[in-house]
Image (cartoon, rainbow, N blue to C red):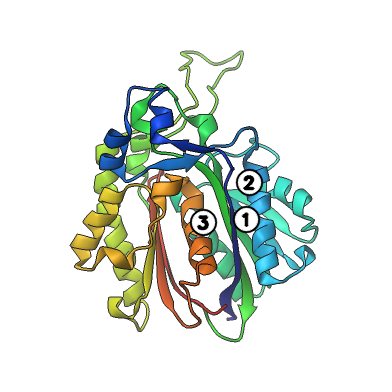
Amino acid sequence: MNNVKIIGVGSYAPERIVTNSDLSEIVDTSDEWISSRTGIKERRITEGEDTSSLAAKAALNAIKDANINPLEIDLLIVATTSPDSFTPSTACLVQAIIGADNATCFDIGAACSGFIYGLNVGTQFVKTGVAKTVLVIGAEVLSKILDWEDRSTCVLFGDGAGAAILSKSETNGILSIFTGSDGKGAEFLKCPAVTVKNPFASNIDKKSSVVSMNGKEVFKFAVKTMPIGIDKVLKDSAYTIDDIKYIVPHQANMRIIEHVAKKLGIDNEKFFINLDRYGNTSAATIPIALDEMAKQGLLKNGDKIILVGFGGGLTFGSVLIEWLI
């Protein structure tokens, strides 16, 4: 089996910053209400760009960081809940934009856990020799599937994209991966597609394609599964929590992160946080954070970090990485 490592990261977010005060002019809310309950202060919202555009820009930044030619990419995976279309896939649209003509392309749907699922899939392709270079992107334009009159959801989310490039390596950088799902909780966080409507259908149940969430149940799921994910990848490796420089969590809610830190008995400072500036960008939160950490010089060669997330599905997962860039 081949070794695998990350050789480049990149991200992109729309220029338009929407603050909590801006939202208070749209729905009945306030900066204090949002900040105290979530830790979010602002988010980026697209003014017209769709998911493939954000994804392609993040991908090009990762390609530049990795110093490769797009033609070297064998596999292109986009994790998204908000694709441009049912078909073609967002991955195929990105392929055309960035010139990754030799890549096999497909999307995966695991909501906020999507980037971790994508890393898992890409890692297996490289390990088995089916691919040498894999581009994994988490990209979302959640603003197009929000109910902007529902203050319980519209204040939480933002738009953005992040990407990482995996490559065959002499030294292993992907030390352990864990993923899981719980479909019994599907109703707790969802966004319906189109209604089943045809000349033969009866009892048509009209659906509204906007995000809805049972926040209490999602919170319970998150604080249960994130510690499980962290413990699992540590047990599958030779490391302990003391060996980990940073934990990069899905950026959903500061209260969740604080609860997980307390449950694990570790300092909040071990968690990298940027949700105050981006909100919840679903599949994009972890790769955006990873790129910020790299650009800020927080990651050094040999550092061990854990990526951990949860999302609709319900889904969850974690990855233990040795930073080898």
> Could one spot residue 179 in this view of the protein?
no
> Which residue is at the far bottom?
170
Q: Nearer the viewer, residue 112 or 88?
A: 112
Q: Residue at x 57, y 47 (%)?
A: 13
> How many angstroms separate mark 1 from mark 3 (CA)?
16 Å
Inspect the image, locate mark 2, and give the three-letter code of the amino acid beneath it: Leu
The image's mark for residue 254 is: none
The image quadrant where one finds the C terminus is bottom right
How many numbered circles does the render carry?
3
Q: Which residue in the structure is indicated by mark 3?
A: 288
Res 309 visible: yes
For numbered disc 2, what is the local secondary structure? helix
- Determine crowd level at label 1: few under 14, some 14-19, many 20+ residues with C-alpha closer than 10 A: many
Residue at the spot x=26%, y=49% of the render? 255
Kindly report the distance in space between the C-alpha atoms of the residues bearing marks 1 and 2.
14 Å
Tag nearer the camera, 1 or 2: 2
Tag 3 secondary structure: helix
Q: Amino acid at mark 3?
A: Ile
**x 23%, y 68%: residue:** 266
Give the residue at the far front of this rendering.
Answer: 21
Q: Badge 1 is on which residue?
A: 77
- Where residue 158 sits in the image (x, y, percent)? 48, 40
Looking at the rendering, which quadrant does residue 265 occupy? bottom left
Give the percent coordinates (x, y) of residue 110: 48, 48
Q: Residue beneath label 2, please? A: 54
| N-terminal-most mark, 1 or 3 | 1
Quarter location, residue 226: bottom left
Classify 10 as above or below 244.
Answer: above
**Disc on the earlier residue, 1 or 2:** 2
- Quarter holding the N terminus? bottom right
